[in-house]
Amino acid sequence: MHGYSDLQLETLGDAILAYSADRLKLDPVPLDGPRTLAQLDAAAGTTITAEGIGGEAALDLFARDLAPACISTDHPRYLSFIPCAPTEAAAMFDLVVGASSIYGGSWLEGAGAVYAENQALRWIADLVGLPAEAGGVFVPGGTIGNLSALVAARHTARMQAAHAGRTGAGARPWRVAATHGAHSSISSACDVMDAEFVGVEVDGDLRLTGENLRKVLLEHGPETFFAVVATSGTTNFGIVDDLASVAAVCQELGIWFHVDGAYGGAGLAAPSVRHLYAGIEHCDSFIVDPHKWLFAPFDCCALLYREPALARAAHTQHASYLDVLTGTPDWNPTDYSVGLTRRARGLPFWFSLATHGTDAYTEAVERTLEVTRFAASEIAGRDYLEVVREPDLSVVVFRRREWSAGDYQVWSDRLLADEFAFVVPTSHEGETLTRFAIVNPRTSEDDISAILDTMA
Ligand SMILES: *Cc1c(COP(=O)(O)O)cnc(C)c1O
C-alpha cells in the first residue's frame, strides 16, 4: 500500500486537496446533522474489505454519506457546548502537519516543531503574565491538561511534605478544592488520581472567592490539599472566578494554584474583559484550549507551568530506551504531561498566529464579545425572554418564559432538523434553560436575531 504509484498518488492527492479546499471555501458551511445507525448502515454499509475499495471511492463515500452525518462545529449558528471555528490558515496547516510525519514529543526528533510550538505557548504565557522560565506543552484537550497540571501539583506537594519531614495525616496531600461550577474534568481527574474533590460554595455572583476558599481549606486542614482550581470562564456561564483573592489564599497557605481557562482563557487577548482576570499572573499552572475560542482545529490545549521543572519531575517517563532523550537538558514536550507519543498539535495554531499576527486574534475575540453583548441586549429587549446572568465573556444563558423542559427540547430538535441552527438546552439549579456560546467570529447579529425569532 505504500507502493501507491505516482499517478495514483497524484490523482488521490488532488482529490483530497480539492475536497479540503472546497470545504474551507464553503460559506456558509452546511450545518448537517446526525443519522441513525440504520440510516448509516443503509447508506454506507461495510466500508472495509479485504481488497480495499480504493482511495477515491472511500473519499466519495466520506463526502456523500459520512461527512453530512457530522455537525459542522464551525457553522455560524452552532452555538451549543463550545463550538470550534478554526481559521482557514490553521485548518490548512493541519494537512501539512499530517503529511509531515513529525514526532512532537522530543527536541531530538521534532526540534523545529517544538521551537514553533514554544513561541505560540510564549504568546499565551505573556497574556497570562507568567515569568520567562514558564513553559509547557500542547495536549489533546482541557481534560488532559487539567489532569496533567494536577498530577504535577500533587507530586510537588508530596515532595514538599516529605522534605519537611511531615508524617502522619496530611503528609501525602490528597485533596483538591474547586467550586461545583468547575468543569467536570476536574472531578474526573480526581477520580483518576484517587484524590478527593472538595467543593467550595460560590458567592452571590457564582464566583469562587478567597474568603469562601479559605474557610474550606482551614476546615479540612490546608496541609491535606495539593491544589486549588479556579476557572477563568466556566463552560456553562463563562464566569471568571475572583482570581486575585484565590491567589492570595493559595499563597498564604502554600497551595498550588491552577487556573482552568480551557474555554475562557482566550479572553486574556481582549482588552475589554482583561480586567476580569486580575490575579491570574500568580497561577502555578494554566490551561487554555485553542480549539475553543482561539480558532485552532481539534485537538489542542495549551498547558503552561510557572516552574516547568516541577512538572518534569512528575511526568518524565523513564525507560532504558528513552535514556537518549531524558538524559539531555533539551526541551522535551512529552515531559510535561500525561502521555508519551505526541502529534505536534500546536503547529496549526502556531501557523495561524504567525500568519495573521496577534492583533487579529484580539480583534476576533473582541468581535465575538460584541456579538454576545448584542445577544444579551436583544434577549433583554424581548418580553418572552430573560437573561439568567449578565455574561462575563461570550456565553449567555437565558430563559424562554413559560417553556417547560420539553418545549426547549422540541424547539432545539426542530432547529437542528431544519439545519437552521444548533442550540441545545442547558440547566441551572434544576431549571431547564438555553444558552449561546459565541466563539465564532462569523456568528453575526443577524444569526442571533434569527434564532431568537424562532422562540417567539
Ligand atoms: C471544555 C472545558 C474543559 C475540557 O476540555 P476538553 O478539551 O473538552 O477536554 C475543561 N475545562 C473547561 C472550563 C472547559 O470549558
Image (tube, rainbow, N blue to C red):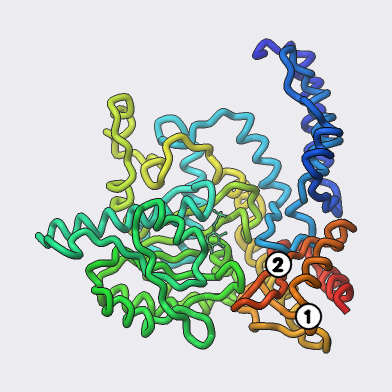
User: Residue 13's x, y, as percent?
Assistant: 76, 25
Question: Which residue carries the number 2 mark?
Answer: 438
Q: Nearer the viewer, residue 197 or 118?
A: 197
Question: Which residue carries the number 1 mark?
Answer: 400
Which residue occupies 70% across, 41% down?
92
Left or right: residue 13 versus residue 153 is: right
Q: Residue furthest left?
A: 165
Left or right: residue 153 versus residue 60 is: left
Point out the image quarter for the N terminus: top right
Which residue occupies 81% across, 33% down?
41
Dot 2 falls on a residue whose secondary structure is loop
Which residue occupies 51% across, 38% down?
113
In this rendering, is residue 201 above or below 140? below
- Quadrant of residue 262 within the rendered picture: bottom right
Q: Amino acid at mark 1?
A: Arg
* Ligand 1 within 8 Å, label 2 CB: no
Dot 1 falls on a residue whose secondary structure is strand
For label 2, the crowd category at 10 Å Cα-Cα, with few meaning under 14, some 14 to 19 and many 20 or more, is many
Q: Which mark is residue 299?
A: none
In this rendering, is residue 205 above or below 364? below
| Numbered-mark total | 2
